[in-house]
Image (spheres, helix red, strand yellow):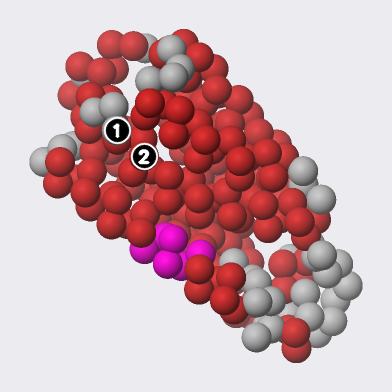
Amino acid sequence: MGEKDLFQSLTREDKISVVLYRTGIAISTILISIIAYMLFNASHYQADAAISIKANIMLILLYASVGASVFFIHLYVSKFHQFLKKLYYLSLISLIILFVIGKGDIYWVLVNKAYSPLLLIPLSGCLGFITAKEAFCFKLMEGYLLALIMPLYLFLLSTGAMTTKAALYWLFFIAAMLILFTARKVFMPIHYDIGDKSAYQ
């Protein structure tokens, strides 16, 4: 479980790493919420070049923000962190594949290729790992829900099991859960994320 006691004085590096970790979570939530809002409000975005550019930028920023959280997360067990990093590297390979298929337009691939959501599963796995870790440590139960729903949502989306309307509503639900999760996480005292440094492997 998460440690709420202050075991050691926090160094400047401790504080910076926690701020970067939580900033990554916050930016990821904001980006997913904006994307959900954009898609919900205009189906014509599919053919809009300006929207495509904005969506591509936001997707790249999403990878960067999740990456910040992946590399600055504090985990007592090093093998868990190594697994999370490998999963993130896999997500970057998936991003490169999307980039190559779309000839630079990732958004076009996601809109036009049914299988493309599968390539987002590693990224959702990284974010889900983070939310599940926080759920385990600090009883943020929506974190467990997000860890299950996000990859499942992408899988079902790739199979065509959901209508466009259902997919948009579920994306809105995911964004709402992320907002709740982020609001409860980012304002915790900084030392909660550090815990007992002597216990790190």
Q: Count how many numbered circles sit on residues in the image.
A: 2
Which residues are the magenta region?
84-89
Residue 9, labelled with which disc? none
The structure residue drawn at horizontal position 61% and vertical position 41%, both measured from the top left corner, is: 148
Per the image, is 86 magenta? Answer: yes
Question: Residue 174, position in %: x, y?
Answer: 58, 31
Residue 73 location, x and y as percent? Answer: 59, 67
Q: Nearer the viewer, residue 161 or 60?
A: 161
Q: Secondary structure at mark 1?
A: loop
- What secondary structure predominates along the stretch shown in magenta? helix
> What's the residue at 81%, 50% (across, down)?
139
Identify residue for label 1.
115
Above or below: residue 193 compared with residue 47: below
SS category of the residue bearing label 2: helix
- Tell me: residue 7, above or below residue 193: below
Q: Bin the neighbour count of mark 2 within 10 Å (Cα to Cα): few under 14, some 14-19, many 20 and up.
A: some
* Type of the residue with mark 1: Tyr
Of residue 149 and residue 19, the one placed in the foreground of this image is: 149
x then y, percent, for residue 160: 38, 20
Q: Is residue 171 visible?
A: yes
What residue is shown at x 59% (from left), y 78% (from top)? 78
Q: Which residue was labeled with disc 2? A: 118
Q: Is 103 displayed left or right of 4 in the figure?
A: left
Image quarter in which the N terminus is found: bottom right
